[in-house]
DNA sequence: CATTTGACGCCAA
DNA sequence: TTTGGCGCCAAAT
């Protein structure tokens, strides 16, 4: 487990229900402001259900991807009250 | 160990 | 507003 990975997971786990963070914000909070892409790689690899990775979206507001299907991600966010 | 890949982000046309 | 190209970084090959 690299430190960066743990940090990213920790930050994502901390996102309050009903709000979202961008990959860039997560990367910054995790210690590497330019690792937005790496954050995606990490979340893509990490299948832990305790991590609400569906609360992480792109900086332009679009959904981005999801390892269980973008449709699923959309539904989860909608359920939590995200525009 | 060297390359390629991909849930990204920013900027110039 | 929509493309396209480049930089960035962790993981997979």
Image (cartoon, coloured by chain):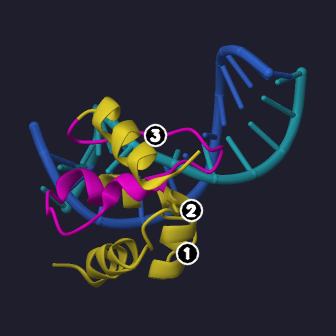
Chain colours: A yellow, B cyan, C blue
How far is disc 1 from disc 3 in space, using C-alphas?
Answer: 18 Å
**Which chain's residue wears label 1?**
A
Is C4 situated above or below A15? above
- What residue lies at 42% left-to-right and 48% top-to-bottom? A77
Q: Are marks 3 and 2 on the same chain?
A: yes
Q: Position of residue A59 (x, y in %)?
A: 62, 51
Question: Magenta part of the protein: which range?
Answer: A42-68
Q: How many marks?
A: 3
- What residue lies at 40% left-to-right and 38% top-to-bottom? A74
How far is disc 2 from disc 1 in space, using C-alphas?
Answer: 6 Å
How far is disc 3 from disc 2 in space, using C-alphas?
Answer: 12 Å
- What residue lies at 26% left-to-right and 80% top-to-bottom? A6
The tag earlier along the polypeptide, 3 or 2, is 2
Q: Position of residue B12 (x, y in %)?
A: 88, 34
Q: Nearer the viewer, residue A2 or C1?
A: C1
Which element type, helix, strand or loop, lies under badge 3?
loop
Q: Left or right: C12 with respect to C1? A: left
Tag of residue A64: 3
- What residue lies at 15% left-to-right and 78% top-to-bottom? A1
């Amino acid at each position: 487990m690299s430190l960066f990975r743990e940090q990213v997971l920790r930050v994502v786990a901390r996102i309050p229900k009903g709000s979202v963070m961008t990959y860039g914000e997560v990367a910054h909070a995790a210690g590497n402001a330019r690792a937005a892409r790496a954050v995606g790689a990490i979340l893509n690899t990490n299948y832990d259900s305790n991590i609400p990775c569906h609360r992480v979206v792109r900086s332009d507001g679009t959904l981005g991807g999801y390892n269980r299907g973008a449709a699923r991600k959309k539904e989860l966010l909608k359920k939590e009250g995200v525009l």
